[in-house]
Image (cartoon, rainbow, N blue to C red):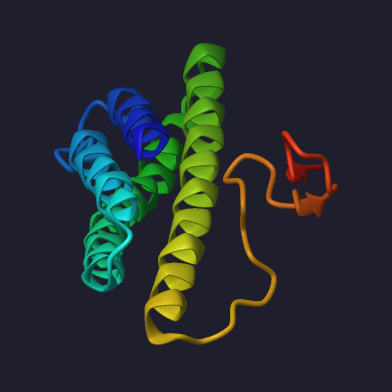
Amino acid sequence: MRTLAREGERLRVRLATTTTRVRDRSRAVGTRLRAIARTLRRRTGEAKAEVLALTAQTGRLLAASAREGRRVAAEAPTKARALARSWKAKARRRAASILASAAGLETLAQRSEKVVEQIRKRLAGEPIEDRLVSLFDPDARPIRKGKLGKTTEFG
């Protein structure tokens, strides 16, 4: 959440004319995640239903941020095209910077939407194939080691 908001804000500053924002919902998500941890400690039957409800809320927050991120990234090509027509090298470099930032934000929004889809499948009880476990390393997979201290590592 925080990275999505940070990249969206970075692109918004580079565009300078856009009014679309990517709201930082990391505090709201953090509250939900702490509530999940508290609920899991109770180990009761109702706790599972509460955890699923909190997970659904987290998914909705992430989906909203991903939508906003895509909206900001969609505005970038028109601004970059206008700058690229300039004869000044500085303007062309700025256009390239805007396009690179937009591509990064679009990738992050796409991966966030995949996480939202995984949350939806988890709530529906459907199996999740090709699970995304890291936004920054999409090829990372959990490795079962069997060590007492660290039973699962990521590689």
Estimate the x, y position of residue 129 in percent, counting from the top left.
67, 77
Q: In the image, what residue occupies the spot 50% across and 47% down?
A: 108
Q: Left or right? Give the position of 91 relative to 76.
A: right
Residue 8 against residue 90 in the figure, above or below:
below
Residue 80 against residue 51 in the figure, above or below:
above
Q: In the image, what residue occupies the spot 27% across and 38% down?
A: 30
Q: Left or right? Give the position of 127 relative to 116.
A: right
Q: In the image, what residue occupies the spot 39% across and 86% down?
A: 124
Estimate the x, y position of residue 153 in percent, counting from the top left.
75, 42
Q: In the image, what residue occupies the spot 56% across and 30% down?
A: 96
Q: Quadrant of the C terminus?
A: top right
Toward the viewer: 86 or 72? Answer: 72
Q: Left or right? Give the position of 134 relative to 36.
A: right
Estimate the x, y position of residue 114 in percent, counting from the top left.
51, 65
Estimate the x, y position of residue 55 in percent, counting from the top left.
30, 62
Residue 43 against residue 129 in the figure, above or below:
above
User: Could you tell me if residue 85 is visible in this image?
Assistant: no
Number of marks: 0
Q: Quadrant of the N terminus?
A: top left
The quarter of the picture where residue 53 lies is bottom left
User: Could you tell me if residue 126 is visible in this image?
Assistant: yes
